[in-house]
Image (cartoon, coloured by chain):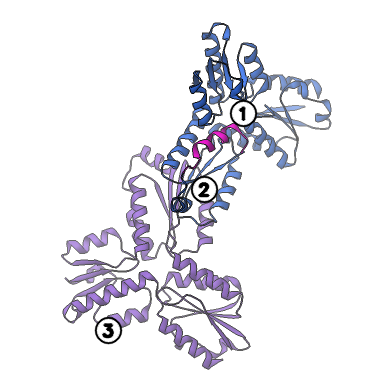
Chain colours: A blue, B purple
Amino acid sequence: MLVKVAGQTGFCFGVKRAINIAEKTLKEASQGKGIYSFGPIIHNPQVVDALSKKGLRVIKDIKNLGKGTVIVCSHGAPKSVIEKIKKMGSRVIDATCPFVKYAQDIVSDLKKQEYKIIIIGDKQHPEVKALLSIAENRGTAQNVTRNRAKKIGIVSQTTQNKGDYLAAICQILKQDFREARIFNTICSDTSRRQALTRRLLSQCDVMIVVGGKNSANTRRLWQICKESGVGSYHIETDAELKREYFRGKRCAGVVSGASTPDSMVKKVVKKIEELS
Amino acid sequence: MLVKVAGQTGFCFGVKRAINIAEKTLKEASQGKGIYSFGPIIHNPQVVDALSKKGLRVIKDIKNLGKGTVIVCSHGAPKSVIEKIKKMGSRVIDATCPFVKYAQDIVSDLKKQEYKIIIIGDKQHPEVKALLSIAENRGTAQNVTRNRAKKIGIVSQTTQNKGDYLAAICQILKQDFREARIFNTICSDTSRRQALTRRLLSQCDVMIVVGGKNSANTRRLWQICKESGVGSYHIETDAELKREYFRGKRCAGVVSGASTPDSMVKKVVKKIEELS
């Protein structure tokens, strides 16, 4: 069977950078003791497991934090969390992706200029939680609120689907506004992988999406595949592949998220060739 | 026959202001000599005729301008024209509608901040011509142009239909952009008359749109009527009404543009009652 791999695989710039920061921090510390990350450093359980074995302790709640060094994960963290960690006396190392940081800076500027801020993304995702923490409105005066409502600032989660973002914007603009400031904060790596996924969908009759089940950008690739009607499977490792996926199929497409190691994509291709 | 008149008729704020400025200027000048307007002061031929009889000379080309006082019409004028008039030694009195002025100020700010400016409106309309003259890009360096293309600023002619404006924006946002700054420069009088026209359309089986054939906001009311499928007629004066318009009809709706005098709306209602 023919196996076509998307023209872009492997870690994106932000993921590569976050892993390098984690590895460097672990190496510098004696035996990696007291090195924490607030949330998984990237959304790929296998990569995070490997870092944990080297001594990185992933915490979800800062209550579980001992004194030491805390790495802020690639998706960023709410301002309040970072402040608390600093107050507890720990050293903070920021591995937030520069593209996520760019979106954070925009939200911060919009807030200073009293825009009503709208973030298009998944409320539960750490990136969006961090953006919301910056957007948080502490003003209470009614006239301020009214004024703000006429000035709207819109940003997107960096891993959003551009079509969905545009649809949301067009919906928002139907409301009464005086000025709307819209930022395209979708990172170019995300856009490229989505475009390449669409291209493969037109050539293949089965699609394998490789990446963390908790990875927003991987899940959006899977969503694009599902919506196309082509049989699609989201897997984290080659071990999840089943022979029946490929029965009667002629061409399999393989796409992967920004936090999926290239080595895993290679394993998946090899396994497909064995099974089909 | 039942005749329903839209809840908003008569001159809008900007038109009333421009007429007041013209009348005051004519009164102050001895016999109104040497008082010009660059283009019709408002887009209603009957009102402009009345002002002409009081001594206002409407010119289309500054070549035809004698020395004196020149009133800039309610729709504004290109910067280059105003500069030329001043150089010729004439006094300039600005009757540009403050809402049009607001759109001009936005375009001027966007230009300073190096946005690529997009104006949604009728290219041939004096308001849009004036906005374009402010937006005009004199930079030629390629890298500047590229940078600008990623920052888009969008404004609308003040008399635009909001639905058409939103459709144009959603189309523009499909292109590659980094930031889009969108201003709702449609004036509230325009929005209100359009909404009231839609309401009357649901109640009437014939519609009379009263206002200058050269009036953009009146023409847009007529467009809304035509698109609805209800028989609609755009007239400037009651003399244009014909008995056949109302044959077999039960309810006539009357709407009017922002530059249509209330007295003309009353004449139209009277004539409909006579004819039907």
Q: In the image, is residue A122 above or below residue A42?
A: below
Is residue B41 shown left or right of residue A135? left
**Same chain shared by disc 3 and disc 1:** no
Which region shows up in magenta? A123-138
Residue A220 image point, x, y percent: 65, 36
Q: Residues within 10 Å of mark 2 (few under 14, many from 20)?
A: some
**Same chain shared by disc 2 and disc 1:** no
Q: Mark 3 or mark 1: which is in front?
A: 3
Mark 3 lies on a secondary structure that is helix
Residue A3 image point, x, y percent: 72, 27
Q: Magenta stretch: residue B178 in it?
A: no
Q: Real-space Cα distance between discs 2 and 3?
A: 49 Å
Q: Chain of mark 3?
A: B
Residue B114: which disc? none
Mark 2 lies on a secondary structure that is loop
Q: At 72% across and 39% down in the image, what residue appears?
A: A226
Q: Residues within 10 Å of mark 3 (few under 14, many from 20)?
A: few
Is residue A68 shown left or right of residue B123? right
Residue B147 image point, x, y percent: 40, 39
Return the residue at label 1: A7
Q: Real-space Cα distance between discs 3 and 1?
A: 74 Å
Three-letter code, disc 2: Leu
Q: Earlier in the sequence, mark 2 or mark 3?
A: 3
Residue B53: which disc? 3
Return the residue at label 2: B173
Q: At 43% across and 76% down in the image, what residue appears?
A: B213
